[in-house]
Image: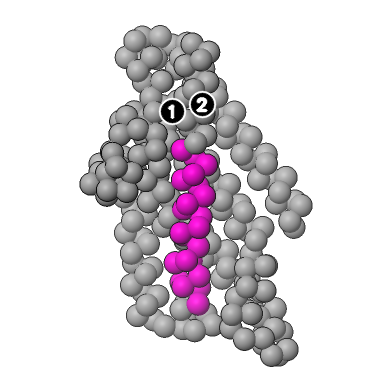
Amino acid sequence: MVSTILNASLQTLYMVFFSTLLSVIIGFIPAVILTLTAPDGLRPNKPVYEVLSFLVNVFRSFPFIILLVIIIPFTRFVAGKSIGTTAAIVPLTVSAIPYIARVFETSLRETDPGVIEAARSFGANDWQILFRVYIKESIPRMLNGIVLLTISLVGYSAMAGTVGGGGLGDIAIRYGYQSYNTDYLIICSVILIIFVQAVQMLGNYLYKKLS
């Protein structure tokens, strides 16, 4: 049991870490575009903003289990297979990108307009305002978003495990539920709770430091 659960825990950490990293990197791009093209942005562009905002909302609306099935061909194209721990990173990342994009957009647009105007008065251009004002002022809020994303992905990774993704969800279903062994169910649940608490505590600590 120890080796089985330890291996599953490492698989869960692997899935959550890389899906969080990839979604944050990729999701940052639409977040910046939405911020710049918003009605109150540095370069307002209603058609671009409305189309991109619509796409983000559409992908956010898909339940993860349905998205997991729908993008199987894409998963197989990217990962070379549709089952396994590495393959599970693809749907986890796809589901997380629109979520983190919206969170980042909200964080960036909460920047104090007075600070932006002050930067303009000193002659800062749009790119300087973006990186030195918007992003710099939003880092603590964006960090909170990443913490919430990571916690959500812990739950999604368990769901991915039920359909061949590996990790603690897979162990809980195969060894616990299907084999009528509640010990596995309880231990897997406790480990997932510990993961979530650890992420939240780390996030709170970093938020205080950055604030």
Q: Amino acid at mark 2?
A: Ser
Disc 2 to disc 1: CB gap under 8 Å: yes
Residue 145 is situated, as x and y percent measured from the top left of the image, at: 56, 53
Which residue shows up at 32% across the image and 29% down it? 164
User: Which residue in the structure is indicated by mark 2?
Assistant: 9
Q: Amino acid at mark 1?
A: Gly
Q: Secondary structure at mark 1?
A: helix
Viewer-closest of 102 and 81: 81
Q: CA distance from mark 2 to mark 1?
A: 6 Å
Q: Quadrant of the C terminus?
A: bottom right
User: Which residue in the structure is indicated by mark 1?
Assistant: 167
Q: With 118 as the anchor, is 177 left or right in this view?
A: left
Membership of 59 in magenta stretch: no
Magenta part of the protein: which range? 15-36
Residue 108 is situated, as x and y percent measured from the top left of the image, at: 57, 68
Q: Secondary structure at mark 2?
A: helix
